[in-house]
Image (cartoon, rainbow, N blue to C red):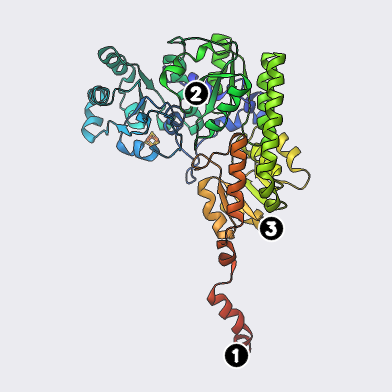
Amino acid sequence: MKLTKGKINELLTQPGCEHNHKKEGEGKNKSCTQQAQPGSAQGGCAFDGASIALVPITDAAHLVHGSIACSGNTWGSRGSLSSGPNTYKMGFTTDLSENDVIFGGEKKLYQAIGQLITRYHPAAVFVYSTCVTALIGDDLDAVCKAASNKFETPIVPVHAPGFVGSKNLGNRLGGEALLDYVVGTREPEYTTPYDINLIGEYNIAGEMWGVIPLLEKAGFRVLSKITGDARYNEVCYAHRAKLNVMICSKALINMATAMKERYDIPFIEESFYGVADMNRCLRNIAAFFGDAALQERVENLIEEQTLKLDIALAPYRQRLEGKRMVLYTGGVKSWSIVSAAQDLGIEVVATSTKKSTEEDKARIKQLLGQDGIMLEKGSPEELLRVIEKTKADLLVAGGRNQYTALKARIPFLDVNQERHHPYAGYVGMVEMARELDEAVHSPIWRQVRQAAPWEIWQQEHESLLHLEAE
Ligand code: SF4
């Protein structure tokens, strides 16, 4: 794939992305083309985004062609789990030196590919360009092609150097690499009329393992996972699915759109968070296939799971009823976590809309009601102000916000990619309830909220100090 201005524009203006087709006039494409702001944390470069999308392919080696820092900054920062091979967990890099920058790094790259194939025998190798190697003009495509022929292993060049844009653009560039080199290159052993792909689900903390058994019990077969807990082979035959189910629309929307055009596979967007969303997801997939027996099986499954869930959640609902939550996350989670929290009797008093589409915002408005606060900005000052104003009992957000919660002396729960517990599906709902309960009722908060000894001293001596001053 040639990384041209036209290609980047195409990825930033995907017709299937609500940021584009729901907006008109001046605001059109604003969220997709937003540029990095000097001085503020951006949440990852394009290379980071591409590796988020591809590294969960567990039996492949992921080789970062660049300085060792690019690899170090991204390695192991996401908790995508594997049920089998762990090759994806190894950090491979060409570790370019000053000499390589001057004389070129292609030879070193070729040697690195050979070395890792000989030692680790991966199913495939993904080679990531970075700022340095893109700037010095190393020909990734040529090296990968030559190495692929020599070592008889698929080698996929990934053109997403950090400087081209945001993490989100990087996700899509990762998707382009799959479309160009992987999808459609092999055939599955067999197909069924109910084969589906999951796109944009990365099996963070093993979330997918709570959902796939449900899908299978309902009668669907997950042909390819793109890319959580995936094997290289299954991504190769993803073109044989009957339906693509997208879990996070913005991340790999280009894959869904391209697979519709190339292989005539329709796509739907779903969420696995909360009872209502999980139910809706199962019903929508069944409705797509239009098979009455399948739909009946789905309804029975929902009934059975809801009954079990009501029993499991009852003690948590009692303890969490009426607690006030401020939520700061992005995309579909900005409303799907709201609905999951409301299922537990928690009142969500504010949520973020920074990365939300117009459709997300409409859903948030409906869920929060008149008094709910929609946060466009999530600076620590703003979050502290909202927590104070709403008298919130807890903050649910991404990992970097935990210090804001500590400053406000309220409990915190991490719901972003660094989370350590799975919250998807019905089992995830119980896990989330348990985590929320533990956070809210931890005895530490009683102690943290007590006045410090010097504050108590100051209060006791205030009148005395006041008199002395007079
Ligand atoms: S911005 Fe460039 S140099 Fe920095 S981590 Fe990303 S690819 Fe590497």
Q: CA distance from mark 3 to mark 2?
A: 41 Å
| Residue at disc 3, secondary structure | loop
Question: In the image as oriented, which residue stretches furthest toward the right?
Answer: 370
Q: Is residue 306 left or right of residue 442?
A: right
Q: Residue at x 30, y 32 (%)?
A: 93
Q: Give the mark nearest the N terminus, 1 or 2.
A: 2
Q: Residues within 10 Å of mark 3 (few under 14, many from 20)?
A: some
- Name the image quarter holding the N terminus: top left
Name the element at disc 1: helix
Estimate the x, y position of residue 108 in percent, counting from the top left.
23, 26
Identify the mark at residue 468; answer none if there is no mark.
Answer: 1
Mark 2: amino acid? Ile
Residue ID for mark 2: 226
Label 3 is placed on what type of residue? Answer: Lys
Tell me which residue sits at (60%, 14%) in the image.
Answer: 194
| Mark 1: amino acid | Glu
Query: Is 152 located above or below residue 308 in the figure?
Result: above
Q: Residue at x 58, y 62 (%)?
A: 445
Is residue 150 visible in the rendered image? The answer is yes
Q: What residue is pinned by disc 3?
A: 391
Would you say residue 24 is visible in this rendering?
no
Looking at the rendered structure, the number of numbered marks drawn on it comes to: 3
Is mark 3 in CB contact (under 8 Å) with mark 1? no
Q: Secondary structure at mark 2?
A: strand
Determine whether, in the image, residue 122 is placed left or right of residue 225: left
Residue visible at 47% across and 19% down? 176
Q: Nearer the viewer, residue 310 or 275?
A: 310
Marks 1 and 2 in Cβ contact (< 8 Å): no
